[in-house]
Amino acid sequence: MDIKTFTSALAQIAEEKKIPKEKVLESIEAAIAAAYKKEYGRKGQIIRAKLNPETGSVRFWQVKRVVDKDMIYSEEELKKLKEKKKKTGTAASSDEKEKIRFNPERHILLKEAKTIDPNIKVGEDLMIFLEAKKDYGRIAAQTAKQVVIQKIREAEKSAIYEEFKSKEGEVVSGIVQRIEGKNVYLNLDRTLALLPKEEQTPGEFYRLGQRLKVYILRVEESPKMSTVIVSRAYPKLVSKLFELEVPEIANDQVEIKSIAREAGSRTKIAVASKQEGIDPIGAVVGQRGSRVQAVIQELGGEKIDIVEYSDDPQRYISQALSPAKVSEVKIMPKNKALVIVPKEQLSLAIGRDGQNVRLAAKLTGWKIDVRGPEEEEEK
């Protein structure tokens, strides 16, 4: 297979894996340079290759760093360093590390470099043109193959990281591929996402092949791979699901002002209209409850209370305690509110294990004390 055909084949692979063409070209050039060095180069050399994908022609250069005499160790200094290492067993100090050990394959003195390029300066890289070769042995070809595989993997990992990093805070759909202990792994088409135990909805069971919508919390990069961490318990999953179901939210006509969630059990959201004539609760609930039911179904039957946001704290707190009916809301110092409810509404206002009043407090940001009329009279 010639270079042109090889490049075309790799370009097709890159398209399938959604890797930028420039990255593929870089991997091919690195592979050809590695093969050239293996077959015709010497130890310590830095070889670069430049491929023309249109013609298949390749040019080669050896790279040498331009140095001055003051930057390199003299023979006497190297001898002293060697003796010191034998006596103390320690490497050179930080001061000594400022100089370099001259390697004729990697370095070139400024005086000599200027005979090749009069404008070159200390610290720059000098590119020395090398004769192109066409014949490569089996070992050189194997080296090139390994370099291509490694570079393609690195490019794919980088592409996946960048793609999902830009999707942090979004909802994506995935299929449960495997379950290992308490961790669930979902196939997101290009990569596997991790749904850890702490981000799972309490009481929710997962099965292989099940399709789920998940919230992308973050993307963690490691030397081997990028890990996409997703959540089913994060409160913003609910608001993002409503964005998908409610066009008025997606079009910024209705805004979700606040959200309080106890995953798997109950969620409260406060909505407000940003455009006159639009009923925010009606828009979110949908015709015959179709929109809110779609979200509830995706969350496995989790209850959702939708209330209208208000700048008036008394009204807002009263609505946040829905479905309970409130008689009176008294605003107290230090961000506290005393709520009086009818006797028959007391248990509903508090909720099972205090859940309703707890979520209302999270939703509004107020410390809420719920009491019946008799308790308030006694006090």
Image (cartoon, helix red, strand yellow):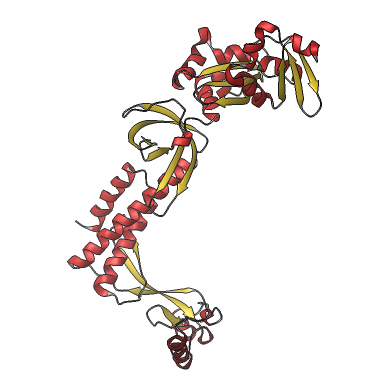
- Front residue of 87/346: it is 346
Please state the horizontal and vertical placement of residue 292, each as a whole percent of the image: 52, 15
On screen, residue 156 versus residue 370, left or right, reads: left
- Front residue of 17/357: it is 357
Q: Is residue 307 above or below residue 164?
A: above
Q: Residue at x 31, y 42 (%)?
A: 16
- Front residue of 315/115: it is 315
Q: Residue at x 67, y 24 (%)?
A: 361
Please state the horizontal and vertical placement of residue 275, each as a whole percent of the image: 66, 18
Q: Is residue 371 above or below residue 19?
A: above
Position of the C terminus by quadrant = top right
Position of the N terminus by quadrant = bottom left
Q: Is residue 183 above or below residue 1?
A: above
**Splitting the image into 4 quarters, where does residue 326 fall?**
top right
- Residue 51 makes an appearance in the image: no
Q: Residue at x 24, y 70 (%)?
A: 133
Q: Residue at x 46, y 45 (%)?
A: 162
- Total marks shown come to 0
User: Residue lying farthest front?
Assistant: 378
User: Residue lying farthest bottom?
Assistant: 76
On screen, residue 42 versus residue 248, left or right, reads: left
**Splitting the image into 4 quarters, where does residue 89 fall?**
bottom left
Please state the horizontal and vertical placement of residue 88, each as a whole percent of the image: 47, 85
- Residue 337 makes an appearance in the image: yes
**Splitting the image into 4 quarters, where does residue 304 fall?**
top right
- Front residue of 128/67: it is 67
